[in-house]
Image (spheres, helix red, strand yellow):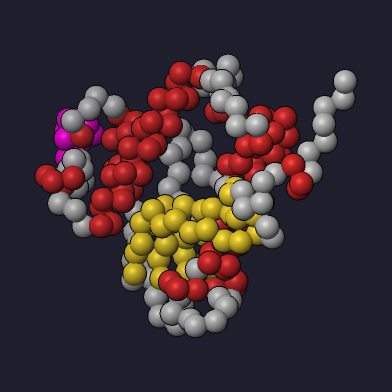
Amino acid sequence: AQPRRMTASTLEPGSIFSQHSLADFIDCPRRFSLRYVRKQAWPLLEVAPLGMDALTYREYLRKGALLHQWIERYWLGVPSAESGLPSNDQSSSPGKRESALGIDDAELSVWWARFLATDFSALPPRRLPELELVAPLGEFRLYARFDLLATGGPGDPLVIVDWKTLRGERAPGYDFLQRRMQTRVYLYVLATAGAPYADVDGDLDPARGVMR
């Protein structure tokens, strides 16, 4: 029997989608159908991205989530001693920084040190970490969670900053990022639902949205 073709009528009105679910649809419509239409649990991948095995990839995601948690607390100004943040001392050796994290993980230590060494002075002054927005998309909704949204006064750009946990590979170039589903979803959601953060009463000019 031929599989049933999925159409917009297959989906419940008001369904909410994200960059991940839309990327699933492009990569494998069958996986999208099982996950988001039939609500079936998807098993652990046998072969994960970046050439990792499935368990290594799961641990990689866990460390990435921990890094995002640290960065959020950093931008919120929560003192290190109260938040579980590692030390902000960049002058210590890598080994001492590892010890300050309270865990034996050199890779996570390198990611954190790379964040602390980044110059954010060119960003607009208002910094909003882990900001969640939902925008209408026809009869559906589109969800985005920005690692950081930096805003300023009227007319200033609204800059979405996305943290990348690289494993020795080169940072992706501008052209690659422009084609990514994440970039397209984030900029659409910002333009459609971001007006309250841009000090405008009406529609937000999409040209003000920038992703880095």
Left or right: residue 48 versus residue 58 is right
Q: Main secondary structure of the magenta part?
A: helix
Question: Which residue does the image show at 54% across and 81% down from the upper left?
Answer: 202
Residue 164 pos. (x, y %): 45, 44
Residue 210 pos. (x, y %): 53, 65
Question: Quadrant of the image for the N terminus?
Answer: top right
User: Can you say whether 67 is above or below 79 in the image?
Assistant: above
Question: Which residue does the image show at 39% across and 75% down from the upper left?
Answer: 152
Left or right: residue 169 versus residue 126 is right
Question: Which residue does the image show at 73% across and 34% down from the upper left?
Answer: 29
Residue 189 pos. (x, y %): 56, 61
Front one among 8 and 196: 8
Question: Which residue does the image show at 44% across and 56% down from the upper left?
Answer: 132
Give, as a single range, the part of the protein colored magenta.
91-100
Residue 146 highlighted magenta (yes or no): no
Front one among 38 and 76: 38
Q: Is residue 27 visible?
A: no
